[in-house]
Amino acid sequence: MRKRSWIAGLFGLAMTWQVSAQDATAVKYASTITAEDLEEYLTFLASDEMEGRDTGEKGQKMAAEYLANFYEGLGLKGPVDGSYFQKFNLSSVSYPQVSLNVGKQKLNNNEDFIFIGDADMSKAAKTDLVFLGLANEENLAKVDIKGKLVGLWAIGSRAQTVVPEVMEAGAAGIVIVTMEGQANFDRMANWYKSLSGRGRLGFEQPTKQEPIFLVSSDMMSKLFDTPVEILKEAAKNNPESIKSQKVNYQVKKNTKVVPTENVLAFLEGTDKKEEVIVISSHYDHTGIDSQGRVNNGADDDGSGTVAVMEIAQAFAQAAKDGHKPRRSILFLNVTGEEKGLLGSEYYSDNPIFPLENTVNNLNIDMIGRIDYEYQDAEDQEYIYVIGSEMLSSHLKVINEYNNITYTNLKLDYRYDAEDDPNRFYYRSDHYNFAKHNIPVIFFFNGVHDDYHQHTDTVDKIEFPLMTKRTKLIFHTTWDLANREHRTPVDGSNTRGER
């Protein structure tokens, strides 16, 4: 770490010595990025007419057409055999019948429990519900879980880790607690309820017979007729002390194909045109909620999408005036981010331009608002920067230099920590480039009360601040696109799978 910081520091000094003034050409085209344009585009993309831009639905497709027409109007190329659309199919999986009965207790789906697994059963299964608590070797030696539904106390653990371990040990299924408090569970249950009619989107996969039920800590207490505090202690030391319960459950599954598309626009470079910089955002959102309200997604991620549009417009105008970038630029608006980074995963697995020639990804996801941390601050001109120094010792320095030279925002790195409990690094589309060792920057304004709510509307966007943030990204892109050498990949990906 010290060595990399030392190299970055020398690199920054070298840049300071070599370039002491603003690039007048870059400033000229950055000035075409305006709050008025951003507001105009966002007012349309985040309107009720778009119906929340849910992946595969009417509004998402209307938004895709809007973006394609915009890029065509700029004279940018459609790089997918002449098209602006990278089309692919997702699979929508729904579970129209899910039942879980423990002893004499009949539980309600998306109220008392949430089904988070996968299964398709022709008839109900009957077995015992046993309490394992923590999924470690000591507990597995004390509790017979084979063929049983297993109660896990996984607060502080990742379900993606503990679930496979228990299933591989012979469990028939799992009832799991991952969070404290009924209120947290209820919020998640309401969200799942709103999705239940549409199904879960993902790439087609064979059915796994893994019935997994998420419950609150209070519900786990009721199921085993044991106080929460006693369950907590038993989870660590003596899970066998908790009496098993009779249980029956059944899951039925439906699957349908959902076509969707990423939107791509391409500006070819000059002498380094084989090298590509990707500017990305996701243009999908979460659709209409269970109460019929449109989740407009103005900040998430209408703000990032219109920022990509304005940056594209600035580069397109520069190219028309004879100032094409040396490297090529791909403007990439992906679908399916809200369903699990699906559009960017599809692109990175099926790239239009070779990944070895992809120099950087600058990803923009929520840059239109002020978050909890800064809502009462005297200086609110900030942006969170995530991932910029993990893979390249140069990228963070380049971004900081352009900020000092042109925009003077506060660059906040608090969420760039590997142990960030919010796991923001894993929650947007840059992840699917970084996993292929492409240096990335994720620009982000943080969360607020309207995050993933129907109240995330255009009237709450801070357009002057959003304009400044967009200009920073433009200047960093301009620099990366025109410098002599591409950013080296001299770091290692220290952050594992999602």
Image (cartoon, rainbow, N blue to C red):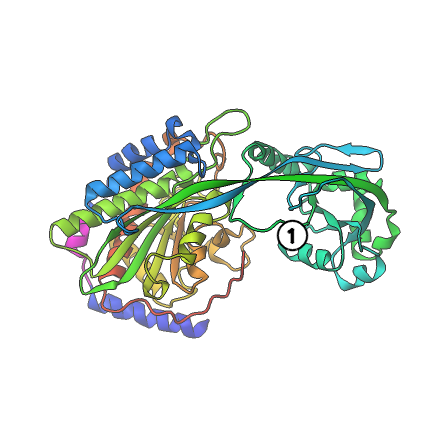
In the image, farthest residue toward the top: 292
In the image, farthest residue toward the front: 122
Q: Is residue 481 left or right of residue 198?
A: left
Image coords of residue 363 (percent x, y): 38, 51
In the image, farthest residue toward the left: 321
Image coords of residue 108 (percent x, y): 71, 32
Asked whether 278 or 247 is in front, the reply is 247
Q: Name the amino acid, label 1.
A: Ala
Image coords of residue 134 (percent x, y): 75, 55
User: Which residue appears at 59% of the width and 36% of the height?
Assistant: 192
The residue pinned by badge 1 equals: 159
User: Which residue appears at 47% of the width and 49% of the height?
Assistant: 341
The region drawn magenta spans 20-29
User: Which residue appears at 34% of the width and 62% of the height?
Assistant: 354
Bin the neighbour count of mark 1 within 10 Å (Cα to Cα): few under 14, some 14-19, many 20 and up.
some
User: Which residue appears at 40% of the width and 38% of the height?
Assistant: 299
Asked whether 116 or 459 is in front, the reply is 116
Let me know if residue 408 appears in the view: no
Residue 24 lies in the magenta-colored region: yes
**Mark 1: secondary structure:** helix
Prevailing SS of the magenta stretch: helix
Image coords of residue 163 (percent x, y): 68, 54
